[in-house]
Image (tube, grey):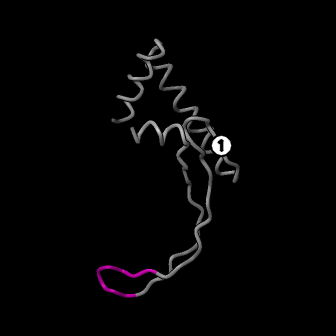
Amino acid sequence: MNKTEFVKCVATKTQQPMAQVDKTLAAMVECITKIIAKDDKLTIPGLGTFSMRKRAARNGRNPQTGKTIKIAAKKVAHFSVGKALKDAVDK
């Protein structure tokens, strides 16, 4: 499913215009991005938790040359699935 299909699905379920649902989705993504960029976490019961994790620096290997390279430390977005979603998918 792509974004357009998702927006159409939500618009059908909520009986809202697709344009309004698209704006709402864009606002949600923007808010979630700002929250995790501040190193806060966002928990949505039934869905899961959005957070940021720090990935340590490490050594890697270039698959083409086999040469060892250094990979810098960085922050990455993380999503932890909630129990309700896990249970729904596991049925």
Furthest residue to the left? 64
**In the depicted structure, whether residue 74 falls above or below residue 59:** above
In x, y percent, where is residue 44? 61, 37
Residue span colored magenta:
60-67
In x, y percent, where is residue 46? 56, 35
* Secondary structure found at label 1: strand
Q: Is residue 41 part of the magenta span, yes or no?
A: no
Furthest residue to the front? 91
| 32 sits left or right of 87 in the view | right
Q: Residue at (67%, 47%) from the top-left corner?
A: 41
Q: Residue at (37%, 29%) from the top-left corner?
A: 4
In x, y percent, where is residue 45? 61, 35
Figure quadrant of the N terminus = top left
Q: Residue at (55%, 43%) from the top-left corner?
A: 82
Chief SS of the magenta region: loop
In x, y percent, where is residue 27? 58, 32
The residue pinned by badge 1 equals: 42
Q: Amino acid at mark 1?
A: Leu
**In the depicted structure, whether residue 36 falls above or below residue 66:** above
Q: Residues within 10 Å of mark 1 (few under 14, many from 20)?
A: some
Q: Is residue 63 part of the magenta span, yes or no?
A: yes
Figure quadrant of the C terminus = top left
Furthest residue to the bottom? 67
